[in-house]
Image (cartoon, helix red, strand yellow):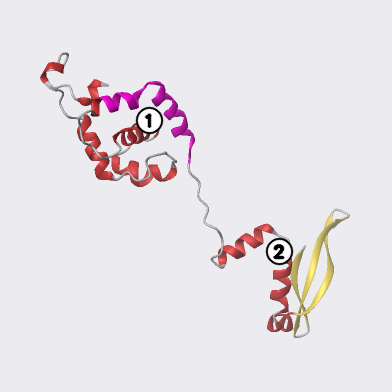
Amino acid sequence: MFFRQKRSGNRVYLQIVENRWEQGRSKQRVIATLGRFDRLSESGQLDALLQSGAKFSESVMVLGAHREGEAPVISTRRIGPALIFARLWEELQIPQVIRRLLAGRRFTLPVERILFLTVLHRLFASGSDRSCLSVWKQDHEIPGSETIALHQIYRAMAWLGESLPQDQQQGATPFSPRSTKDAF
């Protein structure tokens, strides 16, 4: 069914029409003539009729609410990667290793959560630490990473790159000393 304007002389009428098949051809049948289009529009009856009918159609209601700025804001975030990787992270006891390596350090930033975030990012998408925070993390729900800032990621990465003491340099290559990341 649909609305159709029907001209009769110099007047235009609004009709509700349906299509149907008869003998292999499409035929139109007028369900109702609502009245003169100009009078329906001027009086507001057409708008009232359409609004009244719209409450029976969810999609029309959503579109109308969106047009009026009343639609709720809906967002989605992926949870699967963090859930699966968190289990592996815990089973390998990586948080305990990080705490042991940080013993005696006075970091106030959440180093373990930063490392979890950056490793997860590198597993699922390549890119810089900046893209990790500004693009990738926005689409993923990663518990404990809500307040992480870019400068904190840079500090945690610098800590991973710090050279280990001389007594822990066994196996180092001649061109690169062993660093904190090698202690894992």
Task: Decide: is 81 above or below 58.
Answer: above
Task: Name the residue rendered at 18%, 24% in the picture.
Answer: 179
Q: Quadrant of residue 167?
A: top left
Can you give x and y, in whole percent of width and height, for residue 35 in the image? Answer: 79, 79
| The disc label shown at residue 55, or none | 2
> Which sits in the foreground, 65 or 93?
93
Badge 1 or badge 2: first in the primary sequence:
2
Residue type indicated by callout 1: Leu
> Which sits in the foreground, 37 or 53?
53
Task: Decide: is 152 above or below 58.
Answer: above
Secondary structure found at label 2: loop
Near mark 1 (Cα within 10 A), the count class, few <14, some 14-19 or many ≥20, is few
Can you give x and y, in whole percent of width and height, for residue 114 in the image? Answer: 31, 36
- Magenta residues, dominant SS class: helix
Secondary structure found at label 1: helix
The alpha-carbon separation of the residues under discs 1 and 2 comes to 47 Å
Task: Decide: is 154 above or below 41.
Answer: above
| The disc label shown at residue 123, or none | 1
Q: Is residue 107 magenta?
A: no
